Image (cartoon, rainbow, N blue to C red):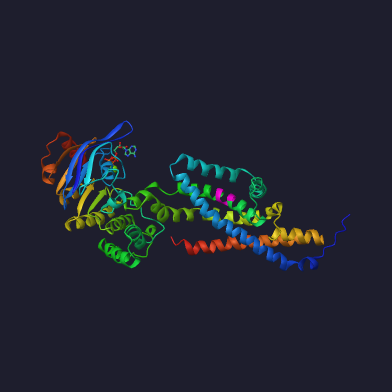
Amino acid sequence: MIEIQNVRKSFGQMEVLKGIDLTVAKGEVLTVIGGSGSGKSTLLTCINGLEPIDSGKILVDGTEVHAKSTNLNKLRQKIGIVFQQWNAFPHLTVLENVTLAPRKVLGMSKGEAEAIAEKQLRHVGLGDKLKTFPTRLSGGQQQRMAIARALAMSPDYMLFDEVTSALDPQLVGEVLETLKMLAEEGMTMICVTHEMAFARDVSNRVAYFHKGVMAEIGAPDQIFGAPQEEVTRQFLASVR
Amino acid sequence: MFDYTFQWKQAMAKLPQMLDGAVVTMEVAVLSMVIGILLAVVLTLLRLSGSRPLAAIATTWVEIARNTPALFQIYMAHFGVASFGIHFSPFVSLLIGITFNNAGYLAENFRGALKAIPETQTRAGRSLGMSQLQAFRYIILPQMLRIAFLPMTNQMVWAILMTSLGVTVGMNTDLYGVTQDLNALTFRTFELFAIAAVIFYVITKIITLGARLLAARLFRY
Ligand SMILES: Nc1ncnc2c1ncn2[C@@H]1O[C@H](COP(=O)(O)OP(=O)(O)OP(=O)(O)O)[C@@H](O)[C@H]1O
Ligand SMILES: [Mg+2]
């Protein structure tokens, strides 16, 4: 379970998260929508401790992310994150990209790590690209590799930050399919996305962020069918 | 006025001794590069450490190495430290001097190479649970060494040529030192130094070529 309690965060003078309260249960798929600069990415990077927070608390399975005593390297093993920019490691093959962390962080043998990596890469449809270097892959393939790389750590949670936004339109579908598959398998996921159809189809709940505040949260039917807040209505009208 | 008669035969008879010297030259250059690269990585880490004093030490090193004559650096490693009662053999002093120079230049090359690697690479590594050091070691370092490979090759060539400065601290077993001693005995100045120059040239060419072959094997992407 991820518990976010009254989290505030500023960059300099600008407050980017203005007291966020949110709980994501095991097995839930939450999508986060909202305008540019509303704090969605910041929230995700706070959850895995890449960014510090100013006040409030984030608990992952009861462990306080920003407590001094928390071993972040350990905690991050159970929180996979995939960014808009997929960050393939260019000097490593697809297989090596995926085995690196299991070997160096989890201390797996090469054979063990490769077995897991192959399984995950096949899972995302890259079973025939193991020995390829990422520069030879399309954006969609690189993004799926990044997903497999995160999955190889056997995380309990997956955070996705606009993973299709940097892709050519014809490659968006294959990555969304991968996310859908994970959701159906019961992975706990927080997906920041601009793909409204995806949000409607896949999520248990949808959260709408507006200027650092979570303006509204609810089932997809409610958010898309009968939004309660004026700002949500305006946003949805603007993206349609 | 021009009454110097070339005597190549006499000079060529010294070739075996000169080649022995070339081996020593190679030893100094290779050692100074290996240690120099390791030290340059350490200097790079110090600069990235976020600690001001540590970064200042690294920057001072780089500044001195790049902005003073290599001759001065080798001289200091021999006669400079001797003032404090530390006495190194000419071989060791030459090695220290060139290594110091290599590390400084390479650290600067590494800094440039790092600028070409996006910050998000480290971030991706950290997200996978790697420590800062692991992310550097497994993600940043290999990319950095590739980008800096050509400057590293150039520095290796410089290291070879810098060994000739060893004569100022009494080094007489390397190619240049051997040649100078032979010259004092035979006075075949032009012939001996011409042969030495050719040997230097051949060595540096082999290094440049070898590096190109190595790069083709090493960098598969
Ligand atoms: N490292 C940073 N330093 C300073 N300001 C930042 C930093 N990261 C984000 N910001 C600012 O914080 C605000 C929220 O950014 P964030 O990336 O969380 O928005 P977002 O909702 O993800 O937007 P988008 O849809 O454009 O990705 C923005 O105004 C952004 O400029
Ligand atoms: Mg964002």
Q: Residue B12 at x, y = what percent?
A: 76, 67
Image mark count = 0
Question: Image quadrant for the C terminus of chain B?
Answer: bottom left
Q: Residue B19 at x, y = what percent?
A: 69, 66
Question: Image quadrant for the N terminus of chain B?
Answer: bottom right
Q: Residue A126 at x, y = what percent?
A: 30, 63
- Magenta span: predominant SS is helix
Q: Quadrant of residue B92?
A: bottom right
- Residue A240 visible, this orientation: no
Closer-to-camera residue (B86/B59): B86
Residue with the most extreme front position: B85
**Quarter of the rendered image showing ligand 1:** top left
Residue with the most extreme top position: A13
Q: Quadrant of residue B2?
A: bottom right
Magenta residue span: B100-104
x 12%, y 45%: residue: A219
Is A162 a magenta residue?
no
Q: Is residue A120 left or right of residue B32?
A: left
Q: Residue B147 at x, y = what percent?
A: 48, 53
Q: Is residue B29 left or right of residue B184?
A: left
Q: Is residue B162 left or right of residue A34?
A: right
x 79%, y 68%: residue: B9
- Residue A73 visible, this orientation: yes
Q: Is residue B60 above or below residue B164?
A: above
Closer-to-camera residue (A93/A76): A76
Closer-to-camera residue (A225/B47): B47
